[in-house]
Image (tube, rainbow, N blue to C red):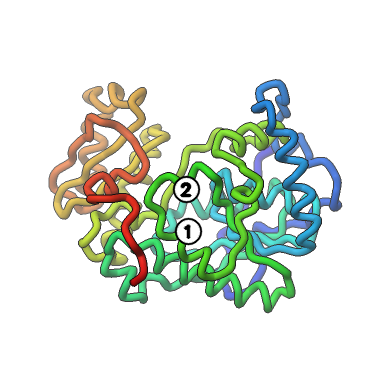
């Protein structure tokens, strides 16, 4: 199904042009819009965990899902839409740290799901702790997110704020999880023991086309700890990543190191960047984005590579 959407005006508490009528609660997710279901590929307990998630959402009654467009939050929103209909709303926070491609993808997917979807502005860039970019940066960003979500939950007369955190997220250094705990946000996938593999298997069981979508972190994660996050630096990284995607690269990160751009690609895509025509276009794109030196990280793509320099991934967040 091809969905063509105009760019909506971003407004506090306004339903975006991507929002569509919710499906009937308890109905099957329409395979025509989500793709062909392949239950045989699901993990053995995916169906059981999916049933438990359905029951948990019915128990909650009405929810605001902090929805980024990634597979985890999209999965929660999809099931919530089926079970709760208009009593489930996906909220996407738009700021300079959200790549334009991610915003558009989130809107398209919400429309395909038939989900209620609203865009709100977030202002983490105005928080000193976020701009300072210490290792607890995500705590300040997520604090902003959950404060907005709680205000919208009350305004939209919903019962609970949910996120898409799963059990696999608990192993890395993720200060945003501390913010969720402080805010009282619920993590139903953690409650029910969903790993990342379980989420993908259950999403595939439902026929969701993004069941294998690569992880996507906000643009501020491309800037080394201790280097201030600015609108200009976020725009620089976002522009170069968008150009690389236009060249056909799928799983990538551009890490910001002042005049140097460090490109991380999936190992399977590394040889293609070395092709003369592609290499020249990539270099020009990086220079247009404001970098002087364009480098390739031979270790390839991995999430949280800036965390590799931390002495411990479980640093204390609060005194």
- Return the residue found at the far front: 319
Residue 203 is left or right of residue 122, and the answer is right
Q: How many marks can you see?
A: 2
Q: Name the residue nearer the viewer: 31 or 225.
A: 225
Residue 86 shows up from this direction = yes
Report, in whole angstroms, how far the alpha carbon at label 1 lies from the one at label 2: 8 Å
Between 43 and 200, the one nearer to me in the picture = 43
For residue 9, say whether it is visible: no
> What quarter of the picture does the C terminus occupy?
bottom left
Q: Residue at x 75, y 53 (%)?
A: 56
The residue where tag 2 is placed is 170
Give the residue drawn at x 34%, y 57%.
Answer: 220
CB-based contact (under 8 Å), mark 1 and mark 2: yes
The answer to whether 318 is drawn above or below residue 295 in the figure is: below
Few, some or many residues within 10 Å of mark 1 (<14, 14–19, 20+)? many
Residue 118 screen position, x and y as percent: 63, 64
**Which circle marks residue 177 in the picture?**
1
- In primary-sequence order, the first of circles 1 and 2 is 2
Residue at left offset 77%, top offset 47%: 54
Residue 27 is left or right of residue 238, and the answer is right
Q: Is residue 160 left or right of residue 100?
A: right
């Amino acid at each position: 199904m091809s969905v063509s959407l105009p760019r909506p005006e971003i407004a506090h508490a306004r339903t975006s042009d991507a929002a569509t009528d919710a499906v009937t609660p308890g109905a099957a997710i329409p395979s025509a819009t989500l793709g062909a279901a392949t239950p045989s590929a699901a993990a053995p307990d995916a169906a059981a965990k999916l049933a438990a998630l359905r029951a948990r959402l019915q128990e909650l009654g009405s929810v605001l899902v902090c929805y980024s467009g990634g597979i985890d939050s999209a999965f929660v929103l999809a099931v919530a839409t089926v079970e709760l209909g208009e009593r489930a709303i996906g909220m996407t926070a738009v700021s300079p740290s959200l790549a334009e491609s991610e915003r558009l993808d989130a809107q398209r997917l919400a429309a395909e799901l038939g989900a209620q979807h609203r865009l709100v502005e977030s202002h983490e860039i105005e928080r000193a702790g976020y701009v300072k970019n210490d290792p607890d940066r995500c705590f300040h960003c997520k604090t902003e997110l959950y404060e907005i979500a709680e205000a919208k939950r009350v305004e939209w007369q919903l019962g609970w704020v949910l996120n898409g955190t799963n059990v696999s997220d608990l192993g890395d250094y993720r200060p945003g999880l501390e913010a969720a705990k402080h805010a009282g946000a619920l993590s139903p996938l953690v409650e029910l023991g969903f790993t990342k593999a379980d989420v993908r298997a259950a999403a595939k069981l439902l026929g969701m086309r993004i069941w294998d979508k690569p992880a996507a972190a906000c643009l501020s994660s491309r800037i080394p700890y201790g280097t201030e996050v600015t609108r200009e630096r976020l725009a620089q990284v976002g522009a170069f990543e968008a150009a690389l995607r236009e060249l056909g690269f799928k799983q990538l990160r551009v890490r910001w190191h002042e005049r140097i751009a460090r490109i991380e690609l999936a190992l399977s895509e590394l040889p293609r960047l070395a092709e003369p025509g592609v290499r020249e276009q990539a270099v020009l794109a990086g220079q247009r984005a404001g970098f002087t030196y364009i480098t390739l990280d031979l270790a390839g793509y991995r999430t949280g590579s800036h965390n590799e320099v931390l002495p411990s991934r479980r640093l204390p967040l609060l005194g």
